[in-house]
């Protein structure tokens, strides 16, 4: 066995080193606190949105079902990367095992792919609701919603099963330092000592398909929606349709824009610093923004939130009054 083969086999299962977000920060402790607060906001905001949708019967319709799926994905999405980043900073550790790296990569790719297709399903839902309102209860019923959501999760997992095993079986005989804060495919591939050009081309084609199909559905849906809105005689109906669609388009622009930069632009456009900034944007900030986009811009969700807060306040007052009445006089 020659020395190169021995080194390749020996280092294949050695731990990776995540460079992380804090190495170049002048105030790592402050940045850690900010990321922790953003993480809590993302979890609480998305969990609250899911709770409101499932507990309020007025929100039991296809649009909010898909929004609850999006919030669920966002909670899982941010939980894959941020806790590891924060824990490593607190403990002063920066290593990640090959198994943990592969699992993180698989879950990340699965959720990204699932969200691509979910955003397309949400656009189709809005198309049917606005362009074919009379047929909407038939075309988008509960069974169809479950099939669409299941299909999104399945197609996302296909992406994870395709890219993760191939990426993790390449020999890594260069530096073990991943210039990132989590195991993202392009960052890990840079460590391989073998020729990855063919795989990178196949990954590029895969990402094009993963983006092209949802983007085609979204573009076609919103083209028809804009034409329908233009023909509407009711100013109130036009305003409501635009408000509903604008929220979704904001999320689509944020998510797809970052994905195009990461997976479709040539490597000459990339630097480790730029890649980490973009990754922070769509792995940490986007899950925080989604609940605000869909709640504060939506009258139904804000009404459900006010109703829940009013109910809790009334319940608390009733319990307090009952407790005081039962207390024996001094």
Image (tube, rainbow, N blue to C red):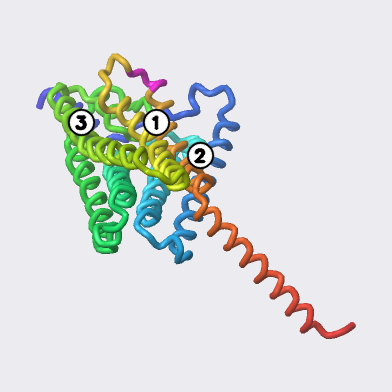
Is 165 contained in the magenta span? no
- Give me the residue at 34% from left, 40% from top: 231
What secondary structure is marked by label 1?
helix
Query: With respect to residue 56, does 266 lie above or below?
Result: above
Spatial distance from mark 1 to mark 2, Cα to Cα?
Answer: 23 Å
Task: Classify residue 263 by image quadrant.
Answer: top left
Q: Nearer the viewer, residue 319 or 164?
A: 319
What secondary structure is marked by label 2?
helix
What secondary structure is marked by label 3?
helix
Spatial distance from mark 3 to mark 1, Cα to Cα?
Answer: 19 Å
> Which residue lies most toward the top here?
268
Instruction: Give the magenta range.
Output: 270-274
Q: Residues within 10 Å of mark 1 (few under 14, many from 20)?
A: many
Q: Residues within 10 Å of mark 2 (few under 14, many from 20)?
A: few
- Circles 3 and 2 in contact, beta carbons < 8 Å: no
Q: Nearer the viewer, residue 5 or 316?
A: 316
Task: Classify residue 243 by image quadrant.
Answer: top left
Which numbered marker is on residue 91? 2
Which numbered marker is on residue 161? none
The residue indicated by pointer 3 is 208
Task: Classify residue 172 by image quadrant.
Answer: top left
The residue indicated by pointer 1 is 279
């Amino acid at each position: 066995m020659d020395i190169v083969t021995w080194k390749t086999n020996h280092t294949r299962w050695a731990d990776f080193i995540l460079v992380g977000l804090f190495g170049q920060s002048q105030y790592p402790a402050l940045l850690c606190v900010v990321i922790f607060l953003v993480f809590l906001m993302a979890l609480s905001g998305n969990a609250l949105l899911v709770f409101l949708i499932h507990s309020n019967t007025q929100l039991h319709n296809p649009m909010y079902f898909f929004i609850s799926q999006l919030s669920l994905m966002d909670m899982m999405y941010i939980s894959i990367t941020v806790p590891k980043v924060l824990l490593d900073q607190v403990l002063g550790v920066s290593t990640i095992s090959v198994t943990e790296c592969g699992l993180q990569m698989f879950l990340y790719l699965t959720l990204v792919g699932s969200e691509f297709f979910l955003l397309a399903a949400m656009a189709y839902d809005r198309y049917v609701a606005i362009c074919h309102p009379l047929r909407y209860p038939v075309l988008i019923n509960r069974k169809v919603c479950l099939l669409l959501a299941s299909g999104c999760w399945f197609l996302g997992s296909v992406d994870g099963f395709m890219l993760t095993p191939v990426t993790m079986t390449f020999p890594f005989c260069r530096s073990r330092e991943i210039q990132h804060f989590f195991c993202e495919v392009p960052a890990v591939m840079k460590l391989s000592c073998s020729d990855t050009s063919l795989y990178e081309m196949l990954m590029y084609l895969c990402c094009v398909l993963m983006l092209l199909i949802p983007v085609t559905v979204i573009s076609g849906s919103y083209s028809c929606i804009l034409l329908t809105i233009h023909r509407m005689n009711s100013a109130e109906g036009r305003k409501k349709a635009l408000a509903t669609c604008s929220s979704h388009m904001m999320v689509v622009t944020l998510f797809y824009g970052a994905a195009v930069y990461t997976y479709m632009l040539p490597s000459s456009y990339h630097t480790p610093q730029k890649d980490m900034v973009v990754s922070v944007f769509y792995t940490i900030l986007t899950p925080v923004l989604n609940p605000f986009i869909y709640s504060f811009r939506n009258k139904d969700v804000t009404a459900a939130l006010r109703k829940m807060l009013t109910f809790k306040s009334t319940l608390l007052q009733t319990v307090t009054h009952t407790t005081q009445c039962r207390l024996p006089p001094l």
